[in-house]
Image (tube, grey):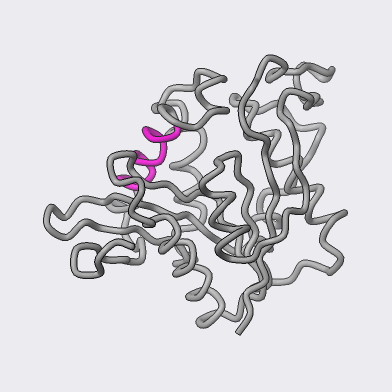
Amino acid sequence: MASNEEYEIALIENDIDARLCATIIAEEFALHNSLVVFNQSTSDELFNECFWPLMIQVLDEKLSFLIRYLPTNEIVAVIIAGDLFLECKNHPYDVSSPASFIPNIDLFSEMLDQFVYHDFDQQLKPYMILSISVVVTKSKYSGKSLAAQLSIHVCNYARDTKGFQYAFVQTSNPATRHIFVKKMNGKEITIVDPATWLWKKKDHGLSRPFKDYKGEPIVNILVKLDE
């Protein structure tokens, strides 16, 4: 476990930190996320198409955090989170809408829609499910349990300050999967092998953009935030 004297968890509250965090996520995903590497998306594409719009979308909710390494003031880990109710209300999944520039986005959106309207046996309400969109640690700081600390912190914070009852995360990263299932007692709801996924939006037909993908599956995980 990383020393609290060296690392500080802080709320992401301003555009400067938000932009730095989105950049870090995009760079780490471009290098190390198996789906992104397979799709050959660049860090600039990821920043512009995914992580900066996502960061701006949830910034005012004040549920996203960073970890700073105090000796250098460097941001070394980031978690982006928001209210799943607002996410679904403001960005409803529509299979008839144009395909995303990055197929990963449509795959995750489809899995989210499946969870909200089929797998979750309750009506979604505000401040009910914390949606954790991304948790990432700079690769040179891996192995220090920073992602686990950040994940536990944001869940406790969301529960204690706003009354969230659950946390929901989608991941293809085995380390993130381990954190939410083994360390936080999450339940795996759906597991999808991207190689089998049919991209229904592509040219209004069917395609398999990940048919040669050999990496980890994508998992929908639900964590109950007990008192």
Find residue 171 and report its image quarter. Answer: top right
Q: Is residue 26 above or below residue 162?
A: above
Residue lying at the far left in this picture: please name it. 71
Could you tell me which quadrant the C terminus lies in?
A: bottom right
Report the residue at 19% width, 69% height from top: 5
Residue 117 vs 139, above or below: the answer is below
Q: Is residue 41 above or below residue 132?
A: above
Given residues 43 and 29, the one toward you in this image is 29
Which residue is nearer to you in this view: 84 or 120? Answer: 120
Which residue does the image show at 33% across and 43% down from the upper left?
138
Which quarter of the figure has residue 212? top right
Residue 81, x across and y down, in percent: 52, 59
Relative to 56, 12 lies left or right:
left
**Apparent side of residue 42 relative to residue 196 in the rendered image (left or right):** left
Q: What residue is drawn where x is 29% and y is 61%?
A: 2
Where is residue 91? Give x, y as percent: 67, 49
Find the magenta span and give its range.
19-29
